[in-house]
Amino acid sequence: MTFVQIIDCKTSRIDDLNRLMDRWVEQTKGKRTATHSIVGKDRSDAAHVVEIVEFPSYDVAMRNSQLPETDRIFREMVALCDEMPTFTDLDVVRDEQMYKAASRRFFELVSMPGELPPLDEVFAEGYHDHDPSNPTDAVGMDALRREAEMWRAAFDFTFTIDDQIADGDRVCTRWTWNGTHVGDFMGLQPTGMEVSMTGMVVHRFREDGKAVEGWWQYDMLGLMGQLGAVEP
């Protein structure tokens, strides 16, 4: 679960504090585990400064705090502040940007050449996939991999993300798929044809950023028409 730490302090020496932060970033290069950091100044109180630091998890944040450079910088930061800084530790329970990035990552992984990469980076173990072109839903990582491998054996393909909309724990991705028919697909022998298809998927995510459910809609009839399996 993503973890965020908020550091709240009062200081009239903001320029010195910024230089201190720059030095900490330089000294911890290659060791620092924070993934994102923002420093903000209160518009109604110029001496009120807030730093928001994001980590992949609480445990990773604790490892970062144990770095000797972090301890030294903290003591110097206290000396620059008018009073002792306060810390608020937050477990992130919703992050729509993280969900959108995870959904995009799936399209990257499934279209990579070579062996199919692990998909547990994006999907929970019990992931449930709803696809109207399948007689039964794909449930679980093994079923998901079999579905992906079927498409990868039949086509060399890429995805283009046309749109993404996030709302709460769900992300809707509208995509364009372009492929070359290189293997058996639903009984059709490879034709070498260049084909394309449009569609969208809604993914539902849990708090740690992994997808637990997906609903697909795409132009399978149009694809089969391009392959000559149905009348135009």
Image (cartoon, rainbow, N blue to C red):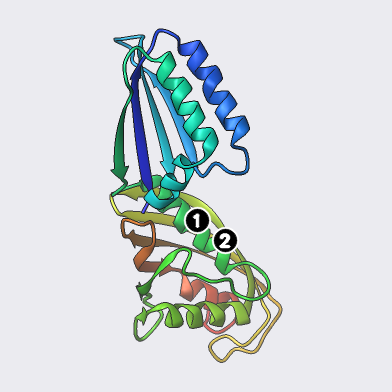
| Displayed quadrant of residue 8 | top left
Q: Which mark is residue 22?
A: none
Pointer 1: what residue?
Answer: 104
* Vertical relation: 206 (above or below) 32: below
**Residue located 67% across and 85% down the image:** 190
Q: Nearer the viewer, residue 119 or 57?
A: 57
Secondary structure of the residue carrying numbered label 1:
helix
Residue 229 x, y percent position in the rendering: 55, 84
Pointer 2: what residue?
Answer: 108
The amino acid on which the numbered mark 2 sits, given as a three-letter code, is Glu
**Residue located 52% across and 58% down the image:** 105
In this image, 150 relative to 47: left or right?
Answer: right
Residue 153 x, y percent position in the rendering: 62, 82
Residue 43, visible in the rendered structure: yes
**Residue located 63% across and 69% down the image:** 157
Residue 25 x, y percent position in the rendering: 57, 31
| Displayed quadrant of residue 176 | bottom right
* Disc 2: CA contacts within 10 A as few (<14), some (14-19) or many (>=20): few
* Disc 1: CA contacts within 10 A as few (<14), some (14-19) or many (>=20): some
Q: Nearer the viewer, residue 28 or 90?
A: 28
Residue 230 x, y percent position in the rendering: 52, 83
Q: Are marks 1 and 2 in contact (CB under 8 Å)?
A: yes
In this image, 201 relative to 91: left or right?
Answer: right
In this image, 75 relative to 168: left or right?
Answer: right
Task: Count numbered badges in the picture.
Answer: 2
Secondary structure of the residue carrying numbered label 2:
helix
* Vertical relation: 53 (above or below) 212: above
The quadrant of the picture occupied by the N terminus is bottom left
